[in-house]
Image: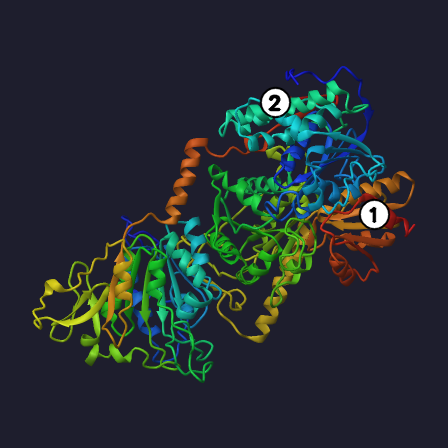
Amino acid sequence: MSDLELESPSTHLPPEEVETVTIRFAGDSGDGMQVTGSQFTATSAIIGNDISTLPDFPAEIRAPAGSLPGVSGYQLNFSSRDIRTPGDEPNVLVAMNPAALKTNIKDLEPGGILVVNTDEFVAGNLKKAGYATNPLEDGSLAGYRLFKVAITSNTLKALEGSGLPHKQVERCKNFYSLGLMYWLYDRPMEQTIKWIDEKFAVRSKEIAEANKVALKAGFNFADTTELFTSHYHVAKAKIKPGKYRNIMGNEATALGFIAASHVAGRPLFYGSYPITPASDILHELSKHKNFGVRTFQAEDEIAAVGAAIGASYAGQIGITGTSGPGVALKSEFINLAVMTELPLVIINVQRGGPSTGLPTKTEQADLLQCMYGRNGESPVAIVAPATPGDCFNMAIEAVRIATKYMVPTFFLSDGYLANGSEPWEIPAIADLPKISINFRTETEGFFPYSRDEETLSRPWAIPGTPGLEHRIGGIEKQHITGNVNYDPDNHDFMCRLRAEKVERIANDIPPLEVFGQATGKVLVLGWGGTHGAITTAVEQMQEQGHAVSSAHLRYLNPFPKNLGEVLKGFETVIIPELNLGQLSVMVRAKYLVDAVSFTQVKGKPFKVSTLVNKIKEYL
Amino acid sequence: MSENGHTTNGAVKLTRKDFTSDQEVRWCPGCGDYSILAQVQRLMPELGIPKEKIVFISGIGCSSRFPYYMNTYGFHTIHGRAPAIASGVKIANPDLQVWVVTGDGDALSIGGNHFMHALRRNFDLKILLFNNRIYGLTKGQYSPTSEFGKINKSAPMGVIDQPINPLYLAFASRATFVARSIDIDPKHLSATLERAAAHKGSAFVEIYQNCNIFNDGAFKGFSEREVREDRVIQIEHGKPLIFGKDKNKGIRLNGLKPEVVTIGENGITESDLLMHDEYSTDPLLGFILGRMEFPEFPVPMGVFRSIERPSYENLLTEQVDRAVANKGAGDLEKLLHSGETWVIGDDGEQTNGHH
């Protein structure tokens, strides 16, 4: 390995054209698989493929090295056509150790490409992974195209004389494996080299250099040894003209709320307590104080929402972010915002439950918690993004609804959306929705609980406004005056009024769109992060000539006004969810439709094939 | 005077009546809360702050009805959480003067966490803790400040919890202003509240307050006029700790232990006595004074500590200002287009942009 110069992709072999490839990188949680995967993603996006990703990491930061619970994976799907999911089965698996092989091999497609780091297949690691014999030698992998590469020792050799400690050098092996994959899929290395330079520039020039050398060594090894019998090219996807960037859901969420604050002309306040998988939103927002963003890492989930309500009471855009366990803790405060009718956005990045559950895995099982999980009659608005990029749009919607209707609004994301990524067409600022905030200043005829005729919202009268001094609180309010009131008829009236206010939001949201014909045999109705899998499955069925359509709810309370009509157009309504049937409960109760609930709670998104098989049962 | 009742220099000529809301006060007749409300309403016009810039925030409990009786902005929140709401209010608008009204159950039991964190962050809040050593609104259960062994509705055989010392909690949280007063001494209470109002940062005032229904006479042993001078010690900055009708008793340190001595006996003079220092950043003096409990000691009243430290909201505002100075005011266009970007042309051709 003397020649480590960067070459343009190999001339030894002309690449074969393929349309879509799914790769999964798997290794120890300290092996840097998330970096490897996200770098492959960034490069693929930039050279024009459509992409969709699924990081999968353990809750433990560093489980014992080589152990099964410590395996971290990153799956990405890249294609020359429009794709919406990270792929059902990987075509390629890169396994950095026996534990990674053991936990991932069952997902690899028959005949798929399997690249293993042979250096790690030693007795101790095999035992930790529960292998009685070495799978590289016992013939158990005969059904795959196995490529054995001494990734660790090749990396060490390439970096001989680097002067870095052994441990540091060994850590560069993820870039070596990335180099192998760049050659195999005909990707340029420039983007990653630039990224390494930027990422490590401050910390250590030597480490940056070593990572670059490892990357190139992997690439050149694949090229010069003709390790792989062929390599592949995935052409650019036909993507709608526009300016794009790659974006993860949590990042889009943060940017969406900053954009909402911008169009509303009010500063953003974000109160949060660290929790997986929502913490990245706090990290991202805390970087943007120059936008007037105030982030507040509170002492607990309760204080985080309380401070957000306080900020909202004082006139800022009050947002709190968490996952399901945090929503449970915040519920009393959310009810205070229901009663005092203050704007509040609650981000819930759902994860597997109940209790601590599966902190790093995805699930959609908090819909009924957000809808009903509080004491008393407690109506709130709920929106849910459908894709990572859609988090941006729905964040703005959440702020628009919360401030216009003076109502707590849930932004219901999930682990899959939060950590998944896709190319995102950057919107023009002029095209963003308008949010107009009108604080009450007129003292004449002011009552804290008077109503806007159209929206039924009460005035937002912030402290500091002369002449509007008033008291609010969690005790039932007298209609109009807002005084403490225990009258039975008033309470009955106020409960109905708060419910009616939320119902009226339906007048102010877009109708539900149907993907496909407006009538037919089967409607697949979904919400949240299942959008990609549902749409892909339905599209496949449509291509085969079946009368199948889908519709995806981005507004869950209230529902779009035409939902009832849409449901009536189909013989069967299937509702796939990553829970045990929560949207089904809501849809059945409201529309008396005998919907088929199709559910899965494995901490993983639906496979397209699973949905296709289900739909076929009803054709 | 301008239309809104302000003089042109911003001073406000208001009276106690301006701060009295139209709501009927519903505390039990004889409750210590009346006295505290009267003192606060009397103090308000003296502060020279327009009433729209004053916010009273409370949790749940008898004391937490307080905001309804103040003709300012007011927020009656949920149990124990007033400091959380108040923190958000101060971040959003540091110009407001925010008072938190809480009780021993509200601040020290269900809200112990928020109380502690508000103090350590030093939000510019005036926190009034009405300590009556009982749960009044729920009708007579023991509170976190109830004495060990106390018989009451939820502990018919006596309380087996050790009481919390709120001052210890305040010092442990590095509170910048700590004081104690009592409902039946309006003059002292008024002076203490005035000091709290003037403090920049979290000002914590423990107010002994009699619940004449469920814990009547809780402080009677030392607070009654006839015995007060012998059983209460007024602490004042820069002065030795002297008390007693004849001003001849004092507190001396024996190692780290306080002890009561008589001036003139055994050769003891004023110079042997413990000197009070409000500005001490060392919590030791606070803990020594805090452990002085009746009947072993006279009960200290007054300002235990008053030190300066930047408030949380000012530090945060400063960070926002610094971010703007360093990076320029946020440019949404630039933010959305940051990172690696690429353009797909109308012909489907791609060009790559950069940051």
Q: Helix, strand, or loop for circle 2? A: helix
Tag 1, which chain? A
**Rendered residue at 88%/42% (across/down):** A541
Can you tell which quarter of the image residue A573 is in? bottom right
Disc 2: CA contacts within 10 A as few (<14), some (14-19) or many (>=20) = many
Is B25 left, or right, of A157 in this rendering?
left
Is A413 left, or right, of A132 in this rendering?
left
Label for residue A213?
Answer: 2
Sequence-wise first label, 2 or 1: 2
Foreground: disc 2 or disc 1: 2
Report which residue position mark 1 lands on: A610
From the image, which quarter does the N terminus of chain A lie in?
Answer: top right
Label for residue A30?
Answer: none
**Rendered residue at 20%/79% (across/down):** B227
Is A605 left, or right, of A456 in this rendering?
right
- The amino acid on which the numbered mark 1 sits, given as a three-letter code, is Thr
